[in-house]
Image: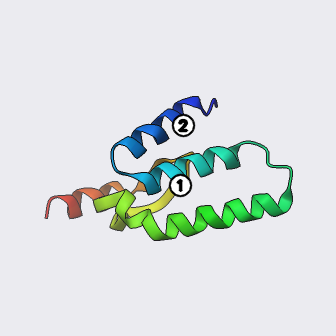
Amino acid sequence: DDAAQRLILADWLDDHGQPERAAFVRLQCRLADWVPDWKERQKLTRQQDKQLAAHRAAWLGKLDGLCHRVEFVRGLCRVWVNGRTLTSKAFR
């Protein structure tokens, strides 16, 4: 649950030409910490939603059309894919 590894990932993403994804990782790490100010938390959540809407397809790549559920947790993606859908579409 330590954010240090994710923040190192964010620095790496910055160094490798992915500043939007790096900012998203940092934002999600901030949201994972307790933010006692409700208005600030709402603002951060809106920023997260806006970044995700803008970059989700690019970050998922070819998986975007195959996932029936996607969850980003501190910048890392968890995907749920139907096995039949994945194999039938991947091998066309």
In the depicted structure, whether residue 90 falls above or below residue 74: below
Viewer-closest of 67 and 28: 28
Q: Residue at x 60, y 61 (%)?
A: 48
What amino acid type should be assigned to the residue bearing mark 1?
A: Glu
19 lies above or below 55: above
x, y percent for residue 88: 21, 62
Q: Quick one: SS at disc 2?
A: helix
| The quadrant where residue 14 appears | top left
Quick check: 36 left or right of 48?
A: right
In this view, the mark in front (1 or 2): 2
Reading the chain from its start, which is encountered first: label 1 or label 2? 2
- Kindly report the distance in space between the C-alpha atoms of the residues bearing marks 1 and 2: 19 Å
Residue 71 tag number: 1
For disc 2, the marked residue is 7
- Is residue 62 or residue 83 the one in the foreground? 62
Secondary structure of the residue carrying numbered label 1: strand
For the N terminus, the image quarter is: top right
Left-right relation of 11 to 26: left
Is disc 2 surrounded by few (<14), some (14 to 19) or many (20+) residues within 10 Å?
some
Q: Quadrant of residue 59?
A: bottom left
In the picture, measured across the screen, residue 53 lies left or right of residue 86, that is right
